[in-house]
Amino acid sequence: MQFESFTELWHMAGHGPFVWASYAITLSVIVFLIWLPVQQRKAFITEQKRLQRIAAHEDKSSNNKES
Amino acid sequence: MHPVRKQRLLVVLFIVVATSVAAALVFYALRENMNLFYPPADIQAGKAPIETSIRAGGMVKEGSVVKSPDSLRVDFVITDYQADLQVTYTGILPDLFDEGQGVVVSGKLDVTGLMVASEVLAKHDENYMPPEVADALKNKPEAK
Amino acid sequence: MWTWFHKLGSPKWFYDISGKLLNFMAPVAALLLIVGAIWGLLYAPADFRQGNSYRIIYIHVPVSVLSLSGYYIMAIAGAIHLIWKMKLAEIAMRSAARMGAGLTFLALVTGSIWGKPTWGTWWVWDARITSELVLLFLYLGIIALYEAYDNKVSASRACAVLALVGTVNIPIIYKSVDWWYSLHQPATIKLTQKSSIDPSMFYPLLIMIVGFYFFYGVALMLNMRTEVLINERKTRWVQDIVERA
């Protein structure tokens, strides 16, 4: 361990803001690049489920008419 | 491979080769302008314009840094080991500024060949090591 | 001879195999990045000249390396798409553009933050930094170009051509510090010579580079899988996945 205490780790002899800002920005971009496709996938599945329901419903109503 | 695909492959190769050639020509034409700074040898040879904003880069010569006692003025010499350039600067120096280290200064050359700098940037090298290793290297007799 | 290659282009095959790969790669990526970051931030020694600010190297170098090698992935996918009209290659190209834009942005931002305490400036128009900025514009340009077309067939073709044209920038970025006088220092990690970084600082860097490669693979495949589902939404196997979800 290079640092004696948390405050020392946080300050990094004056370079803390630069180092921690870099790591924080990187973390947020990493999370964003993972979140984006997961989110799009969720939206897609919700939309397709809705379409499936509509299709099932239409099937039923057309069957009813025929009978 | 299908002949149509072969033809498309040739088109793809042509795109890559053609742009590479174009880029090479552009950079050949621009080769001087792509440099961020002039080395002192080029300035001494008269390649840099006078009274125009330019950048110069090199090593800060050992023992050349003179700090003014009552202002932020610093005078130093940068060198590329072929020629020297006298620089004067008033302002705060970057932390990594030191004798024997690389710098890039921007400013104007006056008629006497003095560089009046408005900005000094520290240029560091690609070596990274812990302080103890650096000390050990310095104390080794064969390492300079 | 080309059958394996065409099989590679099958969306369902890709979806199945990438699902298996993700189960293994995602934990490896997370583990490597966490171990590398903690090692780099807490246990690696401070640099003899730069002090602690050099710890930014543990993200700046991996994201910069990937911003370049990711471009090759995108350009090769673009070439495959142009030659074989393979839909999966087009999806790979567009996913790689998105990844590349994110990583190039990170390379520029972390470099800028690192520049302030070491060089004394946030930004300088030297050859390395300017060519990396051009790379960001190339990635963003490919994303924007695709969105600009209504006809997605011509859109992807135009994107592939732009990706191929931009390939010329990659060796320029890589060699810029050797070809011109720049503020940016030359490469630290060399393939043919001894690297100019102490081993105690190099091991965490190596872990981070490998970790970021795994992360790239994971995020790229996640992107591609979503795009494959959207693309193949009319097929039976996608509708089955929707039903089961």
Image (tube, grey):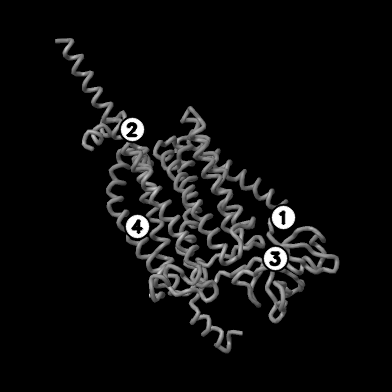
Alpha carbons under labels 3 and 2: distance apart: 58 Å
Looking at this view, name the residue that lies furthest to the bottom.
B141
Q: Residue furthest right?
A: B111
Q: Residue at x 40, y 52 (%)?
A: A30
- Regarding mark 2 in the picture, which secondary structure is present there? loop
Classed neighbour count for the residue bearing mark 1: other residues with Cα under 10 Å, few (<14), some (14–19), many (≥20):
few
Mark 4 → mark 1, Cα distance in angstroms:
42 Å
Marks 3 and 2 close (CB-CB < 8 Å): no
Point out residue C22 in the picture as x, y percentages from the top left corner: 30, 50
Residue B129 vs C140, above or below: the answer is below
Q: Position of residue B130 (x, y in %)?
A: 48, 77
Name the amino acid, label 3. Val
Of discs 1 and 2, which sits in the foreground?
1
Q: In the picture provided, is B102 more to the left or to the right than C31?
A: right
Q: Which residue is mark 3?
A: B105
Mark closer to the chain start, 2 or 4: 4
Marks 4 and 3 on same chain: no
- Residue at figure coordinates x 49%, y 61% from the top left: C61
Quadrant assignment, res C89:
top left
The residue labelled by disc 2 is: C232
Tell me the kind of residue under disc 1. Answer: Asn
Q: Are marks 1 and 2 in contact (CB under 8 Å)?
A: no
Mark 2 belongs to which amino acid? Answer: Glu
Q: Are marks 3 and 1 in contact (CB under 8 Å)?
A: no
Which of pointers 3 and 1 indicates the residue nearer the eye? 3
Query: Quick one: quadrant of the N terminus of chain B?
Result: top left
Image-quadrant location for residue B10: top right
Q: Is residue C165 left or right of residue C4?
A: right
Give the residue number, with chain letter if any, for mark 4: C29
Question: Chain for mark 2?
Answer: C
Asked if labels 4 and 1 share a chain, the reply is: no
Q: Amino acid at mark 4?
A: Ala
